[in-house]
Amino acid sequence: MSERVELFTDGACRGNPGPGGWGVVLRFQDSEKELYGGEVETTNNRMEMTAVIRGLEALSRDCVVDVTTDSQYVKNGITQWIHGWKRNGWRTAANKPVKNDDLWRQLEQAAARHQVTWHWVKGHAGHPENERADRLANRGIDDLGT
């Protein structure tokens, strides 16, 4: 795993739940690729997670990946909370089912192929790639035509 890739991800939702979108800026050396999509009825957290999953799945080979997200939910969930959830049979400390466990499982599987380092940035604070990912996520909603 010598190739280093950067993923900048964001999710958006108009209403929560409501129509949502996800966006990814993927950077490898001097090349960039933009990915985005949307769902008619979803939540902001699901779109934040979907952005990272789609970005990681777009990589054709194992890589060293820097994932930058503005979602504490995603970063803390995949780096800290998931271990307890798995140990507890996908139940929270309060013994309730983990929300979005389907996506947590997908995210864990997508990340397992790579050597991932997770970074958090404050959303809507002028980080150029985060702002681009946000615009892509909103384009995903706009393309739904809702």
Image (spheres, rainbow, N blue to C red):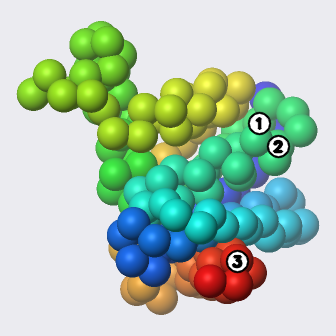
Q: Residue at x 39, y 77 (%)?
A: 15
Residue 141 horizontal/vertical position (percent): 63, 78
**Residue 109 lies in quadrant:** top right
Which tag is nearer the camera, tag 2 or tag 3?
3
Residue, x 25% and y 22% (percent of image)? 91
Of circles 3 and 1, which is in front? 3
In the rendered structure, the answer to whether residue 20 lies left or right of residue 93 reads right
Q: Please tell me which residue lies in front, 62 or 89.
A: 89
* Amino acid marked by disc 2: Leu
- Residue 63 badge: 1
Look at the picture and state if 7 lies above or below 88.
below
- In space, the residues marked 2 and 3 are separated at their CA atoms by 25 Å
Secondary structure under badge 2? loop
Measure the alpha-carbon separation of dots 3 and 1: 32 Å
- Quadrant of the snapshot with the C terminus: bottom right
Q: Measured along the vertical axis of the image, is residue 17 above or below residue 118?
A: below
Q: Are marks 2 and 3 in contact (CB under 8 Å)?
A: no
Left or right of 55? Residue 34 is right
Tag 1 secondary structure: loop
Using the rendered image of the protein, determine whether residue 75 is visible from the camera's viewpoint.
yes
**Residue marked by disc 2:** 59
Residue 107: quadrant of the picture: top right
Query: In the image, is residue 88 above or below residue 49?
Result: above
Mark 1 vs mark 2, foreground winner is 2
The answer to whether mark 1 and mark 2 are in CB contact below 8 A is yes
With respect to residue 65, does 34 lie above or below? below
Query: Of the numbered discs in the image, which one, if any, rests on residue 144?
Result: 3
Write the residue at 18% across / 28% down.
96
